[in-house]
């Protein structure tokens, strides 16, 4: 049995802990997107790169469920393969941030002193560069590819993860259970991995989901500018960019990828927010 | 491998603190937490360390466990100099000395199960046999009055403060240590639970043959469990002596002030109208000479110039005062 | 010398909806406080004493349901519109909380907080408010009061902050002061000073005071009447000397016995109360203390005892097996 005298704030927080229907819908959309992107190869779709010059900007039909784009390529197939790009970049880049940023943040928050100053300082330098310009510069230098894009976005995300991990570690490292582990003679590695990591993981995961949402938008923006994945691969951002030309004739070419991106980003935000609400009060109540 | 340490019956003190000085910096200021404290604890004894917040008693307790690096001075445990130890040797020593904290819920990792938390000391000290671990964990949980079947698989937030403190005590006992530092173990608990935990500590002391350093700010609690008591003020010891003797006839004016201030649950005892003696000074800039002189009704010129050392004022009782209440 | 009752609580109950079920924080409490008198409310955490003080101040959480009547100075606080209540709070009805670090605004100076209260309720101009603030700080024995006005709460020690909180509470000459565990977070020597200050000011201003604490020692010499709470109810109520000398509730006796006494010899085993306080979301059918009571009988587990009179109208208790009159607790 937990605390008996519930304080006023605890009662209010307990109400917020229920997962609402909105959250479940978000989870549903996310699952749907993942499934569709993963099994894109086995789905009975026309190829997203086959151009059919006779059927350019064709409306919806049995052959092309969502019509075709400006070069006669099947819109639905392009949307689904575009989902793949967005999700791959959207997930892999934050993973880079999570691993490196999370590790640096935890080490900085635990060891403090000069190491911490060094880490925080270098992160500040990285943050000082306007991210989009840096991304453009690196891509211009290294060339456009999925891997390069993922890496640069991943590196750009490291400072934010470092901040979250460090903040969390700073509060936790002072708690008695960490001192208790030290008093038992546990090595630093043991304390970091067994005592701190399970606790820091929660806020990091919540932040991860929010970061996925942001990365998808950034990838979309870069692709829109023509600096994301190179053609003929489709990405929601590049589809929006291409759809710009057909706005009067076939507005769906721009709007459908935009809606797909909007719903996906919204879903990640909702789930990330809910996770954050679930993890924070518990930590506060300790 | 846990060796069943045979509790030696040597006459040497188990713990000896020799002129320990601990300081730490806050911003660009230095806090003189412990300024030259010497004491010793005999085997099987409970020494109560009492003082108000800021006096350095918690820092001293943690310094004894090498959780703070002392600026100077030594801590000798069973003849071994803890202050000079490093790495593996220190880790081995740590298994013989344990610590119980004030906030029982914060002392437990909120994301680990109770069984794992109590097994952690065993894992760190190399007990790899899982069966053996479980056996020892179950045994120690039973000793503190908890049912292992009901408790081992749950998380800390499912338990009350009193139960968490029992779990912390179990964790401290699982390695069969010789010495436990109890840092305000009952201050965060309710009155009715306090008595339970104090009784439990006494019981465990007898069962495991422990030596205790009991740190608290509540004098009555300290007196209830201690054989000898040491009073600390702003980083220095004011008085040391057998509990009964010190409380019956305190030698140091600060001890007397503490005793007077205790609220007595008896309506006939009118609370003594205390003359406002002000606030304790900050440990960043302690007063010169005797640190208590700014609040002491007996202070004079000598007190501001000369720092008093602990001197015998009665058999077994020592006080650091130029004008003690007894035995001057 | 019967004073007119300043505060009368009748059948006050507070229910809080929680995901685990309804939580009865306060269960049908009747209390009176006469003008100029001190009532001590004693209980451990979870007994509902803090919720009770919030009920008096009408500062309950939004989801809480409260019933009963709270008559203060002739007005029923449950019926008053929020505007009138706000004028009452701080002026006639003042509070001092446990933790001065959170009850004082950390980003405002001491002076601002004091002057704000004075100008809000007494409509003084700035100069007059400043002068009065200095007087108040001096009255609560804060040295160098003029300098303190410009300081922030974190620059003061815990004891000083609590004095400031008391000064703010007393600034508008309240008729009733509620002190909710005012010294629990302070050292024992400072505790004594703060309690003396409260009692002194209470006597000087002929103010009523409710002193809420978990420590029987704190109420012993400083209150006129004591009410002991357990699991949301008042289980015993009596004038202070009567409570300590002629207690009837086994819980009161057990509580007193469980406190380590300074004159007891070391290593005397403490008569502890076994078990834990009940879960307020699962109220027991019988007496809430029965699972832990050493005198409990069948009736105690099945029926809730009502408050009945002991040897006089002023001493009430709720127990089917009260301890004998004249028994000295802890003996």
Image (cartoon, helix red, strand yellow):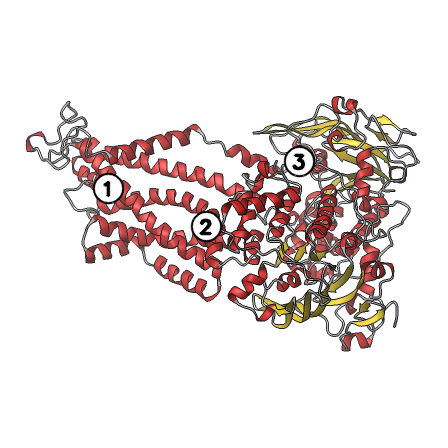
Residue at numbered disc 2: A197
Q: Is C70 above or below relative to B292?
A: above
Q: Is residue B30 visible?
A: no
Q: Are marks 2 and 3 on the same chain?
A: no
Say which chain tag 1 marks.
A
Say which chain tag 3 marks.
C
| A46 with respect to B165 (left or right) | left
Residue at numbered disc 1: A85
Q: Is A23 above or below relative to C123?
A: above
Residue drawn at 17 percent across, 42 percent down: A233
Q: Nearer the viewer, residue A61 or C309?
A: C309
Quadrant in the rendering for residue B52: bottom right
Image quadrant holding the C terminus of chain B, namely bottom right
Quadrant in the rendering for residue B4: bottom right
Say which chain tag 2 marks.
A
Q: Is B270 above or below relative to C325?
A: below
N-terminal of the two: label 2 or label 1?
A: 1
Contact, mark 2 vs mark 3 (Cβ under 8 Å): no
Between circles 2 and 3, the one closer to the viewer is: 2
Q: CA distance from mark 2 to mark 3?
A: 40 Å
Residue at numbered disc 3: C59
Q: CA distance from mark 2 to mark 1?
A: 31 Å
């Amino acid at each position: 049995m937990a605390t008996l005298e519930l304080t006023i704030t605890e009662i209010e927080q307990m109400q917020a802990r229920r997962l609402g229907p909105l959250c479940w819908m978000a989870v549903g959309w996310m699952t749907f997107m993942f499934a569709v992107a993963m099994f894109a190869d086995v789905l009975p779709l026309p190829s997203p790169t086959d151009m059919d010059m006779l059927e350019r900007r064709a409306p919806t039909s049995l052959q092309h469920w969502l019509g075709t784009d400006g070069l006669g390529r099947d819109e639905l197939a392009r949307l689904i393969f575009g989902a793949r790009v967005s999700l791959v970049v959207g997930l892999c880049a934050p993973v880079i941030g999570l691993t490196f940023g999370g590790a640096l943040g935890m080490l900085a928050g635990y060891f403090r002193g000069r190491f911490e100053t060094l880490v925080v300082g270098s992160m500040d330098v990285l943050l000082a560069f306007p991210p989009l310009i840096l991304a453009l510069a690196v891509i211009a230098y290294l060339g456009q590819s999925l891997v390069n894009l993922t890496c640069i976005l991943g590196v750009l995300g490291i400072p934010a993860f470092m901040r979250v991990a460090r903040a969390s570690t700073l509060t936790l490292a002072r708690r008695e259970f960490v001192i208790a582990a030290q008093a038992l003679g546990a090595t630093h590695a043991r304390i970091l991995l067994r005592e701190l990591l399970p606790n820091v993981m929660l806020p990091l995961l919540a932040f991860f989901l929010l970061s996925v949402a942001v990365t998808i938008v950034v990838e979309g923006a870069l692709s829109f500018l023509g600096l994301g994945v190179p053609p003929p691969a489709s990405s929601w951002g590049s589809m929006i960019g291409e759809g710009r030309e057909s706005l009067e004739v076939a507005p769906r070419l721009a709007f459908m990828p935009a809606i797909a991106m909007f719903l996906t980003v919204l879903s990640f935000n909702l789930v990330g927010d809910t996770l954050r609400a679930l993890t924070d009060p518990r930590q506060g109540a300790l | 491998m846990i060796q069943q340490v045979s509790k030696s019956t040597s006459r040497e003190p188990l713990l000896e603190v020799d002129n320990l000085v601990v300081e730490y910096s806050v911003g660009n200021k230095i806090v003189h937490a412990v300024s030259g404290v010497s004491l010793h604890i005999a085997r099987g004894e409970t020494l109560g360390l009492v003082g108000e917040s800021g006096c350095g008693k918690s820092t001293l307790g943690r310094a004894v466990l090498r959780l703070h690096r002392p600026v100077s001075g030594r801590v000798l445990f069973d003849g071994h100099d803890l202050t000079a130890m490093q790495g593996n040797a220190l880790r081995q020593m740590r298994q013989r000395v344990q610590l119980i904290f004030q906030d029982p819920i914060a002392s437990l990792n909120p994301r680990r199960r109770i069984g794992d938390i109590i097994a952690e000391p065993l894992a760190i000290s190399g007990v790899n046999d899982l069966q053996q671990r479980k056996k020892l964990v179950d045994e120690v949980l039973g000793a503190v009055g908890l049912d292992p079947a009901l408790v081992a698989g749950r998380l800390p937030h499912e338990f009350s403060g009193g139960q968490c403190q029992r779990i912390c005590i179990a964790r401290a006992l699982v390695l069969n240590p010789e010495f436990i530092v109890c840092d305000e173990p009952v201050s965060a608990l309710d009155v009715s639970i306090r008595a339970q935990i104090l009784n439990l500590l006494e019981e465990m002391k007898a069962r495991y043959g422990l030596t205790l350093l009991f740190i608290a700010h509540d004098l009555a609690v300290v007196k209830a469990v201690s054989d000898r008591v040491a009073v600390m003020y702003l980083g220095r010891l004011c008085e040391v002596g057998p509990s009964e003797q010190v409380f019956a006839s305190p030698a140091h004016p600060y001890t007397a002030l503490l005793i007077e201030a205790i609220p007595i649950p008896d309506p006939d005892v009118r609370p003594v109208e205390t003359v406002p003696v002000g606030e304790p000074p900050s440990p960043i800039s302690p007063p010169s000479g005797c640190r208590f002189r700014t609040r002491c009704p007996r202070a004079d010129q000598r007190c501001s110039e000369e720092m008093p050392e602990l001197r015998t004022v009665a058999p077994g009782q020592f006080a650091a005062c130029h004008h003690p209440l007894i035995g001057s | 010398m019967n004073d007119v009752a300043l505060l009368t609580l009748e059948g006050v109950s507070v229910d809080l909806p929680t995901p685990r079920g309804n939580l009865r924080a306060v269960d049908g409490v009747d209390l009176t406080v006469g003008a100029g008198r001190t009532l001590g409310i004693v209980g451990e955490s979870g007994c509902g004493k803090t919720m009770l003080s919030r009920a008096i101040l009408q500062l309950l959480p939004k989801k809480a349901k409260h019933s009963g009547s709270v008559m203060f100075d002739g007005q029923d606080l449950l019926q008053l519109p929020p505007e009138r209540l706000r004028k009452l709070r701080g002026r006639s009805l003042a509070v001092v909380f446990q933790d001065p670090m959170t009850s004082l605004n950390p980003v405002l100076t001491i002076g601002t907080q004091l002057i704000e209260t004075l100008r809000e309720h007494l409509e003084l101009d700035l100069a007059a408010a400043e002068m009065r603030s200095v007087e108040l700080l001096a009255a609560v024995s804060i040295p160098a009061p003029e300098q303190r006005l410009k300081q922030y709460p974190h620059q003061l020690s815990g004891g000083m902050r609590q004095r400031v909180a008391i000064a703010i509470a007393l600034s508008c000459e309240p008729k009733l002061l509620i002190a909710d565990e005012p010294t629990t977070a302070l050292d024992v020597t400072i505790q004594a000073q703060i309690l003396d200050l409260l009692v002194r000011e209470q006597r000087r201003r002929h103010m009523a005071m409710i002193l809420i604490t978990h420590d029987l020692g704190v109420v012993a010499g400083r209150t006129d009447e004591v009410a002991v709470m357990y699991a949301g109810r008042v289980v015993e109520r009596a004038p202070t000397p009567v409570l300590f000398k002629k207690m009837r509730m086994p819980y009161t006796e057990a509580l007193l016995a469980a406190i380590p006494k300074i004159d007891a010899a070391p290593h005397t085993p403490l008569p502890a109360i076994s078990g834990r306080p009940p879960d307020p979301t699962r109220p027991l059918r019988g007496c809430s203390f029965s699972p832990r009571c050493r005198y409990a009988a069948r009736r105690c587990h099945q029926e809730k005892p009502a408050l009945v009179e002991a040897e006089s109208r002023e001493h009430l208790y709720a127990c089917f097996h009260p301890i004998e009159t004249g028994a000295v607790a802890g003996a």
